[in-house]
Image (tube, rainbow, N blue to C red):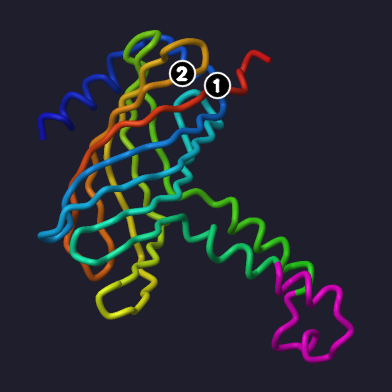
Amino acid sequence: MRILLITLLLLFTTTANAQFTSNRWHVLGKYSYGTIDKAQYNNFSLGAEFMPTDRIGLNYNFEFLFRNDDYFHFHSSIGALAGPPLIIIGAIATLSDNDDWNDDAFNLGPLGVLLGIAVLIAPDGISYHIPVSYKWDLAPYANVLGVDVVRNRDIGKTYFKYAMSYGAKATYMLNDHATLNFFVETRKVAGFNWGFGGGFGFGYAFSSRNE
C-alpha cells in the first residue's frame, strides 16, 4: 500500500524531463530471485521495451526460470508462441496448390500471414513511466499477455500455462545509453500460487526521439 501511494503521488506531482524516456527502445538483461509456492527460483531474462510515447512502454520478455523443486519455466508473450505457426500456415496456404490447404474450412492464406504478424508483435504487457529526475525513471507495469512453458523434470511432462506479472521498476541512466535497473514484482502462473521476487538488470536505451 505504501509503494502504491508513493507511485500515485509521483504520478500526479512530477514534471521532470527524464533522459531515459527520450529514447524509443530499451533492451536489457535481467536477473531476479524469489519464491513460488514453497520453492525458490532464479530467473534469467532478456527483455525489450518499445515506447510509442514518453510515458507508455510496451514490454517484451523472454525468461528462463529455474526452481529448486524440479520445475522449469520458459516465459514469453502469447504472441511469440502463436504468431510464427500462423505465419507459416498462412504462407503455406498462400503458396500451395494443394486443395487440402485451400478448402473453405482452412483457407487462412494471406490473412493468416497478416494475423500471425499482428499476434507476433503483440507485447507481453504495458508500463507507465514517471520521470523522477533527469537520470531516474520509475515505472509500474502489468504483463498480462504471457504464457509459461512449464517443464516438470521430476515426471518428464510439459505444460502450457497462462502467466502474468505485476511490478514496479526503477531505471538509472549511467550515461547517454547504458542503464541500471531494479525491480520488484509478483508473478502468477495458472495452477500455481502467486510468486514474489525482485532483481536487477543492465540495459541499453537507443533511438532518440530527437533524431
Asked if residue 190 lies in the magenta stretch, the reply is no
Within 10 Å of disc 2 (Cα), the crowding (few <14, some 14-19, many 20+) is many
Given residues 171 and 203, the one toward you in this image is 203
Task: Name the residue type under label 2.
Answer: Phe
The circle on residue 20 is 2
> Is label 2 in contact with label 1 (beta carbons under 8 Å)?
yes
Query: Neighbour class for label 1 at 10 Å: few (<14), some, many (≥20)?
Result: many
**177 or 58, nearer to the observer:** 177
Q: Quadrant of the N terminus?
A: top left
Q: In which quadrant of the rendered view does residue 4 lie?
A: top left
Q: Is residue 101 magenta?
A: yes
Q: Which mark is residue 159?
A: none
Magenta segment, which residues?
A: 88-108
Whole-percent x and y of residue 88? 71, 69
- Which numbered tag is attached to residue 23? 1
Q: Residue 128: where, in percent of width, then height?
A: 38, 32
Helix, strand or loop status at disc 1: strand
Placement of the C terminus among the 4 image quadrants = top right
Q: Is residue 113 left or right of residue 52?
A: right
The structure residue drawn at horizontal position 39% and vertical position 71%, both measured from the top left corner, is 160
Q: Residue at x 34, y 44 (%)?
A: 142
Position of 209 relative to 33 (above/below):
above
Residue name at image x 24 percent, y 67 percent? 70
Of residues 98 and 106, which is closer to you in this image? Answer: 98
Amino acid type, label 1? Asn
The residues bearing labels 2 and 1 have C-alpha atoms spaced at a distance of 6 Å
